[in-house]
Amino acid sequence: MLKIIVPSQGQSNLSFSFFERYGIPPPPSGVDAEINDDVILKFDDEAEAVTYAEQLEDMATEINDKTTTQYLAINDIIAAIMNDEFVQEFMRQE
């Protein structure tokens, strides 16, 4: 199981409720919230994380207003995934 933390202090101030409020699909293995409001994304492996990030990138391109909280939240999630050391190593091997 791969867990990636998305800090709540990002551009969007992402919280657990954003997934439902802004129609952001959760990762296949789920989402947890930490006491400090950081969001924990759960994946079976790095490949699942990359696929999820790509799906969110597709969703972000369809948003016209790039200043919305939804767009910023999606970008915070993508950045957390792509900056994860295990995901980066997986991408290098691809």
Image (cartoon, rainbow, N blue to C red):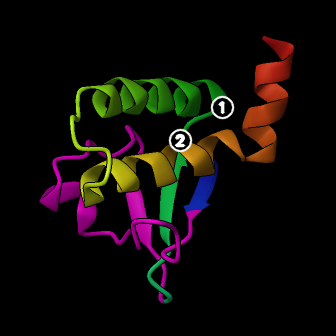
Asked if labels 2 and 1 touch by Cβ distance under 8 angstroms, the answer is yes
10 Å crowding of disc 1: few (<14), some (14-19), many (20+): many
Is the residue 81 above or below the residue 51 in the image? below
Please tell me which residue lies in front, 65 or 83.
Answer: 65
Q: Amino acid at mark 1?
A: Glu
Q: Name the side, left or right, on which 72 lies relative to 70.
A: right
All told, the count of numbered labels is 2
Q: Give coordinates of residue 22: x percent, y percent.
A: 17, 54
Bounds of the magenta segment: 6-35
Asked if residue 30 shows in the view, the reply is no
Check residue 59 in the rendering and tell me which mark sits there, or answer none.
none
Could you tell me which quadrant the N terminus lies in? top right
Q: Which residue is mark 2?
A: 43
Please tell me which residue lies in front, 69 or 43.
Answer: 69
Residue drawn at x 52%, y 77% as measured from the top left:
9
Q: Secondary structure at mark 2?
A: strand
Q: Give coordinates of residue 24: x percent, y percent.
A: 25, 46
Q: Which residue is mark 1?
A: 46
Residue pushed farthest bottom? Answer: 35
10 Å crowding of disc 2: few (<14), some (14-19), many (20+): many
